[in-house]
Image: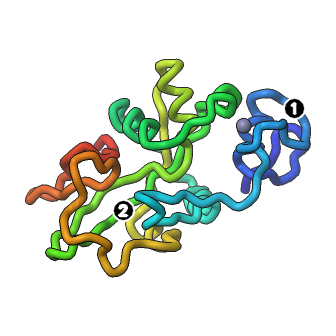
Amino acid sequence: MVVCVVCSCRLPPRQLEVNMIEGTPHPAPACRRCRGGKEFFRYWNNCYEFDVDRARQLVQDGRDPVEVEEDSVQASVDECRIDEEHVSHVDPSFPGLIAHIRYQAADGVVYKGHVLIDGHHRAARCLKERRPFAAYLLTEEESLAILLRSPDPPRQETSPGPGTVGLVSSASDGSLVGRGFLVPH
Ligand SMILES: [Zn+2]
């Protein structure tokens, strides 16, 4: 359960982050990204949509966050529209969320990878301050459970191009390759 450290009431996580770092009571500050409400993450031209609130509930089972490689943090931040004002007051120690993502091309080839679905502004702050960024990793089953929309049928004939971040191919040994969002082992 997410509880405000200031007044002990329940809060949307983003507002909680702000309260944790600024020690300010409600209501949320003027930043439009801190006003709460239901959160979704849309990816790859809105072909995928994840329920971030549900994902946050799932990872509150005592699991440990994983430290994310800097290149992957940078790639995730680069593909997102970053609001500098919001970056300035998020709590960089609050872990992000990483989901599994799967894409089946029309030729039958399946691409698997990881994508950061929450924490892009915390990640940006970590990069800026040269500190590690951590995230909770959802299982494949959990990632499916929070997936509200995905390409079905596949939207294109060819495989994703080299500029696509987050969708990475799986090598014959099962390891993830490519320039997607990789989680360190
Ligand atoms: Zn904000």
Q: Provide the secondary structure element on which disc 1 rests.
A: loop
Seen as rendered, the residue at the extreme top is 129
Q: x%, y% of residue 86?
A: 67, 33
Quarter of the image that includes the C terminus:
top left
Q: Mark 1 points at which residue?
A: 24
Q: x%, y% of residue 62?
A: 56, 53
Q: Name the residue under label 2.
A: 101
Q: x%, y% of residue 130?
A: 47, 19
Q: Vertical placement of 70 versus 54: above or below? A: above
Would you call the spot at circle 1 few (<14 residues within 10 Å), some (14-19), or many (20 or more)? some
Quarter of the image that includes the N terminus:
bottom right
Circle 1: residue type: Thr
- What label sits on residue 5 in the rendered view? none
The answer to which of 166 and 129 lies nearer the viewer is: 166
Q: Vertical placement of 127 versus 98: above or below? A: above
Circle 2: residue type: Ile
The answer to which of 9 and 166 lies nearer the viewer is: 166
